[in-house]
Image (spheres, helix red, strand yellow):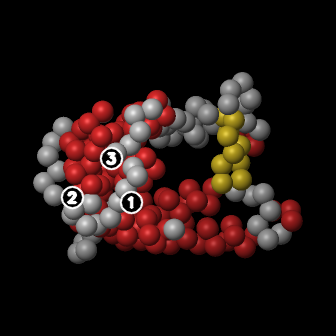
Amino acid sequence: MTGLLELAGANTNPQSRRDLVNVLKLAQMAWEDEKSTSSRRRPSPKQIQQLEASIEKTRMLLTQIREYDDFRNIGFVAQQIGRGVVAPPAQGLPRNPSISDEELIFPHCDGPVVAINIEPLLRATSLYARRRRRGRGGPKNLEKEAVVFYAEWFFRRHSPKKPSADPKNPFHEFAERFYQVVTKTEPGGLDRQIRKVLAARRSGQ
């Protein structure tokens, strides 16, 4: 871990170390999920497109109906952490939680409660499906991209250097070492994933 901090030129204070430990865990979970997904049976491209269209229609209707006073809070819900709707990443969530209608409207309050905005979650679901379409031009090496995403997240927050696509930029060496720590394997080249992650970051700013 110290080696990664040195490669990033990051401070070695407790906050930097905590952030690095947490982001390594998230990267490992994302990498393992992407690796296992690539070997599973997949829905047809038509099913995925139908799901995307349905989600997009729901998002549009949700935005429109929120303009009415009586529905301005629709899609904003509060739920207790750990009861099947929201949980810390390491804890995981059940695929089909058993939650009554009453519990969805009136959450339990015997633990921490968080507020949730459904619209970004719908958008994230649509993006998740879109990235997994089959066919020409479909996603490749998403497990690498997931690891590079978390490496860039840490580097951007803790390094005095700004990450760039220039191979001489220290982020490249950091990303490769980060990948080795997460996957226990050699990356075999991350240039394409680095360019993609950095481009997505610029477009989102």
Q: Quadrant of residue 196?
A: bottom left
Which amino acid type is marked by label 3?
Ala
Q: Earlier in the sequence, mark 1 or mark 2?
A: 1
Query: Which residue is label 1 attached to?
Result: 162
In percent of width and height, residue 47 lies at 39, 66
Which amino acid type is marked by label 2?
Leu
Q: Nearer the viewer, residue 79 or 102?
A: 79
Above or below: residue 97 compared with residue 30: above
Q: Nearer the viewer, residue 64 or 97?
A: 64
| Total tally of numbered discs in the picture | 3
Above or below: residue 141 compared with residue 184: below
In percent of width and height, residue 141 lies at 23, 58
In percent of width and height, residue 108 lies at 72, 31
Give the structural element (helix, strand or loop) at label 2: loop
Residue 115 left/right relative to 144 = right
Please identify, in this view, whether the residue under mark 1 or under mark 2 is nearer the observer: 1
- Image quadrant holding the N terminus, namely top left
Q: Which mark is residue 8?
A: 3
